[in-house]
Image (cartoon, rainbow, N blue to C red):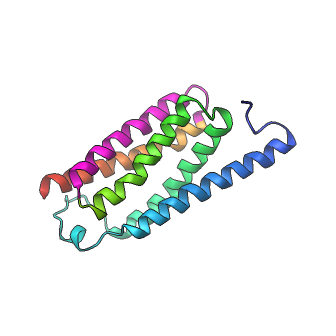
Amino acid sequence: MAPLSRGHGGMRSSLTTQIIFVLLVLGIGFAIGSTTMPGQWYAAQIKPSFNPPNWVFAPVWSVIYLLIALAGARTWQQAPYGVAMMLWTVQMLLNFAWSPVFFAWHRSGLALGIIVAMLFAIIGFIVERWPTDRTAALLFVPYAAWVAFATLLNAGIFMLN
């Protein structure tokens, strides 16, 4: 399938694709985040000393979700059925699964497995996109760094509790 970004109509399709990805990723992320807010269980958990204040998470995830959406839109436009799009989809499913498992089900060990798998999918996406779309790959670098940090937090909470 040809990229959607060719020609005048392609620019409109490109913008439409970006808007759809942003609305979907931010919308689903917001819906999951608002229905799985940290509650009393999380407040009672012993946390690692490097745990940031709770107010940090929402703005960081909002920016990261925007970057994820833009990388996904670029990938969809260039190779909608390729390995990179599969990795993008897998990391997104794992991302959306993590909050309910951790905050709603209180399963920090299972959540740790999910976030480790997510980190591998994110790194795989970066490696896969690097040769053909460095912009999409670079959009995932802050995400990889944040998820690596979140993995340490998850591991710390799992081990301390």
Is residue 111 within the magenta segment?
yes
Q: Is residue 19 left or right of residue 129?
A: right
In front: 46, or 72?
72
Q: Which residues are magenta?
A: 107-134
Q: Quadrant of the N terminus?
A: top right
**Would residue 28 be visible to someone looking at this image?**
yes
Q: Residue furthest front?
A: 105
Q: Quadrant of the C terminus?
A: bottom left
75 over 65 or under it: above or below: above
- List x then y, in percent, for residue 61: 45, 59
36 over 145 or under it: above or below: below
Please give the name of the residue rendered at 19% of the width and 53% of the height, measured from the top-left corner. Answer: 156
Q: Is residue 134 left or right of residue 49?
A: right
Picture quadrant where residue 99 is located = bottom left
65 over 140 or under it: above or below: below
- List x then y, in percent, for residue 53: 31, 68
Q: Residue furthest top?
A: 131
Is residue 131 within the magenta segment?
yes
Please give the name of the residue rendered at 51% of the width and 57% of the height, measured from the top-left corner. Answer: 63
